[in-house]
Image: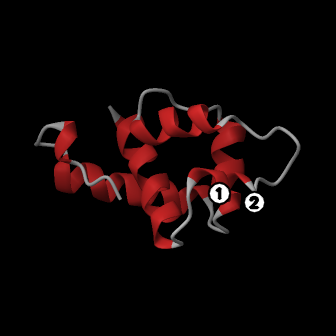
Amino acid sequence: MMNVFIGRAFRVERHKRGWTIEEALAHWPNEKTPKISTIARWERGANLPSLSALGDYAAVFGVDLSAIIASAEELKNEFGAQEVSGVPQG
């Protein structure tokens, strides 16, 4: 279930900047850019990216991966007792 909160934390970062997934991908730090559908699955918590891709996605936003994990922990603490659908979408 933590993957849901990690995905939501990334979505929050993206929405803070007012970016679409396509705009976030334009900032991808290397040539291994994932597909839009892959990012959407990550943000929904349907899949969890590899550790390397997690680091790349954090770099897109200029934040350390530990900041994403801390944000995910906050979301988990706030919404963990509720249905996952109660987690803010961004």
Return the mark for residue 27.
Answer: 2
Which residue is located at x 45 percent, y 44 percent? Answer: 7
Of 38 and 80, the residue lying toward us? 38
Task: Give the left or right position of residue 22, taking residue 6 as reference.
Answer: right
Type of amino acid under label 1: Ala
Name which quarter of the figure residue 34 lies in.
top right
Crowding around mark 1 (Cα neighbors within 10 Å: few <14, some 14 to 19, many 20+) is some
Please indicate whether residue 35 sits to the left or right of residue 78 in the image.
right
Task: State the SS at label 1.
Answer: helix
Closest to the observer, 23 or 61: 23
* Badge 2: residue crowd in 10 Å (few <14, some 14–19, many ≥20): some
Mark 1–mark 2 distance (CA, rounded to whole Å): 6 Å
Task: State the image coordinates of residue 5 (x, y, percent, origin top left).
Answer: 36, 45
Residue closest to the far left: 82
Residue 24 marker: 1
Quadrant of the frame with the C terminus: bottom left
Question: Going 66% across and 59% down the picture, which residue do you hit?
Answer: 23
Quadrant for residue 38, please give it: top right
Residue 43 locus on image (x, y percent): 46, 42
The residue most toward the right is 31
**Which colour style is shown?**
secondary structure
The residue at the point 20 percent across, 40 percent down is 85
SS label for mark 2: loop
Identify the residue at the far bottom of this view: 17
Q: Is residue 78 left or right of residue 66?
A: left
Q: Amino acid at mark 2?
A: His
Vertical placement of 21 versus 67: above or below? above
Residue 46 spot, x, y in % from top left: 42, 27
Q: Quadrant of the N terminus?
A: top left
Q: Position of residue 42 (x, y in %)?
A: 51, 36
- Disc 1 vs disc 2: Cβ atoms closer than 8 Å? yes
Question: Residue at 75% of width from left, 60% of height from top?
Answer: 27
